[in-house]
Amino acid sequence: MDMTTPLFEMREISIAFGGIKAVDHASVDLHAGEVVGLLGHNGAGKSTLIKILSGAYRADAGEIRVAGEPASIASPRDAKRYGIETIYQTLALADNVDAAANIFLGRELLTSWGTLDDSAMESETRKVMGRLNPHFRRFKEPVKALSGGQRQSVAIARAIYFNARVLIMDEPTAALGPAETRQVADLILELKKQGIGIFLISHDLHDVFDLADRVSVMKNGKVVGTAHVRDVTQDEVLGMIISGKCPPGAVAGPGALRG
Amino acid sequence: MTELAPAPAAPSQDVKTFADHLRAIEFDARMVGMIAALAVIWLGFNWLSGGAFLTPRNLWNLSVQTASVAVMACGMVLVIVTRNIDLSVGSMLGFVGMVVGLVQARLLPDLIGFEHPATWLISIATAVALGSLIGLFQGALIAYLAIPSFIVTLGGLLVWRGGAWWVTQGQTIAPMDSRFRPLGGGIEGAIGTSASWAIGLVICALIVAGIAFARRRRKRYGFALRPLWAELALAMLACGTVLGSVMIANAYALPAGIARRLTEAKGGTWPDGGLVIGHGLAVPVLLALTVGVAITFLTTRLRFGRYVFAIGGNPEAAQLSGVNTRKVLMLVYGLMGALVGIAACISTARLNAATNSAGQLDELYVIAAAVIGGTSLAGGVGTIAGAMLGALVMQSLQSGMVLIGVDTPLQNIVVGIVLVLAVWLDGLYRKRLG
Ligand SMILES: Nc1ncnc2c1ncn2[C@@H]1O[C@H](COP(=O)(O)OP(=O)(O)OP(=O)(O)O)[C@@H](O)[C@H]1O
Ligand SMILES: [Mg+2]
C-alpha cells in the first residue's frame, strides 16, 4: 500500500503563531481507504496540522500534494473542492440554527426558484442522522439546545454527507456515549471500505489501534515517527507520545529522540 | 409582516401536553408578548387622552410616522445579528436626504425641467444608490480592514452629519417635487379607499396561498402537519388584521374642502350635506411593509440570510464552512445603506424639505426598535417582524406622550426607561427558554 502514490501528502509543513512553532517540518501522508491515527500530547500540534489541510490556516512553509500533484489550499472552500471534509475539535457549529442549517451551511439545497429548500434539507438530515444517532429527534431546534454528543453527531453528519475523499476527524468521539462511539467506529470502517482516506485524531490508544492502519505521533510540533499498527505495540506508541522515543518498528521523523 | 419562518415539526407522540399544543400551532410567545405590550400602551394612552389615541386619524398618523424608522430597523436587525452595530444611520439619512433635495430641487429642474415626470424616480434611485455606496464603504472598512463597527460607524455619525451641512452650507431645500411628496404620506400620499380594499384583499389572498403552499410542501416530505384548525385560525387572524387596518385607514376622512375638490375634479357633484371620503392606506406605510416582507424573505428563504444568521451564531464556524464571511458582512452594510436611502426619501418627502438636521437621533430609535423587537445584541437572533413592531411600540410611546402633553425631556426619560426595561424582560424570557 505504501508503494503507491498517496492520496494526500503533507510535506515539511511549518506554521508558527507569534514565536510558537505549533507545527515544525511535519510530514504525513494518507492513502485511499486508509485510516491514519494522529497522536500526541495536548498542544502537540495535531489540530493545527490538520487545520492546514482543511484550509483553516495557511502554512508558513511546506507543500500539500493531492494524488502526487501540488495542491494549493488557501481556504476551507478550496479544501472542500479537493474532497476534504473536517470534523473540528471545536465542532464549528453555528449554535443559533438547526441541525439541517449546519449540515448544509455553505452548500444549501435550493428550490428551482433559488430559495432555500428547507424541507429537502430536513429530509436529508433525517436520513444522515439516522445512520449516526438513530435516537436524534430535535431536528427543528437550534443546535445550542442539543447535548454535547448530539452536537458532535451533527458535526460528523456534516462531514460525511458530502462524499468526501478525505475525512479529518479531530477527536470525533470525545463527547459520545458508548453506543454512539461504536456507531462512529463502524462508520469509519464502512467509509474506509468505500475507499475514503481518514485522518483520525484521538487520545484513545485502544480505539486508534482498533481502527487505524498506521499511526503518526507528534510532539512539540514535530513528527516523532510513523508506524504500521502491526509493527508496534501500544506501549511503544505510548513511549513515542510521552518521551519521543522511536521504536524499531517505526520510521523516525524529525521529532524523534536522538541517541 | 407575514410570518415566513419555517414551521417547527409537531411532536409525534400521542399524548400531548399543553406546551406541545402551543408548539404545534407555532405559538410565538415573544411576538404575542410584544403585541400585548402594544395593546397596553394603546389602551393606556387612549384612556389618558380621553379617547383621542384610538381614532382613525391618530392611528393613521402613527403608521406614517413609524415608516421611516421601521424601514431602517429591518436593516439594523441584520447588522446586529452579525454581532455588529451601525451608529451612522441617522447622519446618513440626513446626508442622503440633503443630496436628494439638491438633486430634485436644484439639479434636475436645470437638466430635464421643473416637475418632470421622471424626477421622483431619479430621486429615489439616487438615494438608494448613494446610501448603498456609503454602506458598502463602511462595510468594507469593517469587514476587510477589521476596524470595529462601533468605531467605523461612530466616525460615520460625525462625518455624514457634517456632510449633510456641507451639501448646501446648512441651507434648507424646499419644496419637493409633487410626485415625490406622496412617499411621505400626507393627503397626497393616501391611496384612497378602493385601492386600499384591493390591496388588502390581495394581501389576504397571498397569506392564504402562502399557508397552503407551506402545508403542501411539508406533506410532500411526510413531515408532521399543524392541525388544520390552527392553520385556519392563523389565516383568519392575519387576514382580519390586514382588513381591520384597511378599515381604520379608510375611516379617516379627508378634510371636507379637499374631498369636495376631488369629487368635482372627477366630474361628480358635491351634495349639500357633504361627503365622507376616506384617506386609505398611506404610501410610506405600504413601502415599509413591502420592505419588511422583502427583508423577511431575504433572511428566511435565501442563502444570504442563512449566512447572516450563521455568522452571528459562530463567525468561525461560518468561515470554516466555506462562507465568505467578509463579503456577507460588507453586503449587510450595503443593504443597511440602501434602506437608509429609502428612509431618507420618506422623511424628506414627509417634511417636504431637505434639512441637514433630518434623522438626528434616528440611529438610537432604530437600534432601540430592533432590540425591543427581540434582536439580541450578542448576535445570531432577531426577526424583521419583531423589529417593525418594535418601531411601532417606540413611535406609539412618543406620539402618545405628545398627545397627552408630556414635555420633551420627560418623553426622553420614559423612552429610555422603557428600552432598558424591555431588554431586561427579554433577557429573563430568553433565560427561561435556556
Ligand atoms: N490560533 C492560534 N494562535 C496561537 N497559538 C495557537 C493557535 N492554535 C494553536 N496554537 C498553539 O499551537 C500549539 C499546538 O496546538 P494544537 O491545537 O494543534 O494542539 P493539539 O495537538 O491539537 O492538542 P489537543 O490534544 O489538546 O487538541 C499549542 O501550543 C497552541 O497553544
Ligand atoms: Mg487538538
Image (tube, coloured by chain):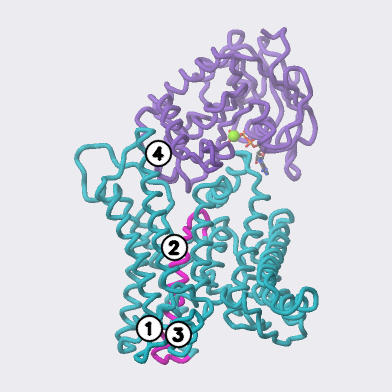
Chain colours: A purple, B cyan
Give the residue at mark 4.
Answer: B217
Return the x and y of residue B139 as percentages of the image width and height. Answer: 69, 59
Looking at marks 2 and 4 on the same chain, the residue that comes earlier in the sequence is marked by 4
Give the residue at mark 1.
Answer: B276
**Amino acid type, callout 4:** Arg
Q: Locate the N terminus of chain A by quadrant.
A: top right
Give the residue at mark 2.
Answer: B386
**Amino acid type, callout 3:** Ala
Q: Is the magenta stretch mostly helix, strand or loop?
A: helix
Looking at marks 3 and 2 on the same chain, the residue that comes earlier in the sequence is marked by 3
- Marker disc for residue A111: none
> In the picture provided, is A250 more to the left or to the right than B59?
right
Taking the magenta stretch, the answer to whether it contains residue B89 is no
Q: Do the residues labelled 3 and 1 touch (CB within 8 Å)?
A: yes
- Marker disc for residue B259: 3
Looking at marks 3 and 4 on the same chain, the residue that comes earlier in the sequence is marked by 4
Tags 3 and 4 both on a single chain: yes
Q: Quadrant of residue A16?
A: top right
For mark 1, does the 10 Å Cα neighbourhood hold few (<14), some (14 to 19), or many (20 or more) residues?
Answer: some
Q: Do the residues labelled 2 and 4 touch (CB within 8 Å)?
A: no
Q: Give the range drawn in magenta.
A: B378-407
Read off the chain for label 1: B
Q: Are marks 1 and 2 in contact (CB under 8 Å)?
A: no
> In the picture provided, is B133 more to the left or to the right than B54?
right
For ligand 1, give the image quadrant: top right
Mark 1, mark 2: which one is toward the viewer? 1
Q: Locate the C terminus of chain A by quadrant.
A: top right
Read off the chain for label 4: B
**Amino acid type, callout 2:** Gly
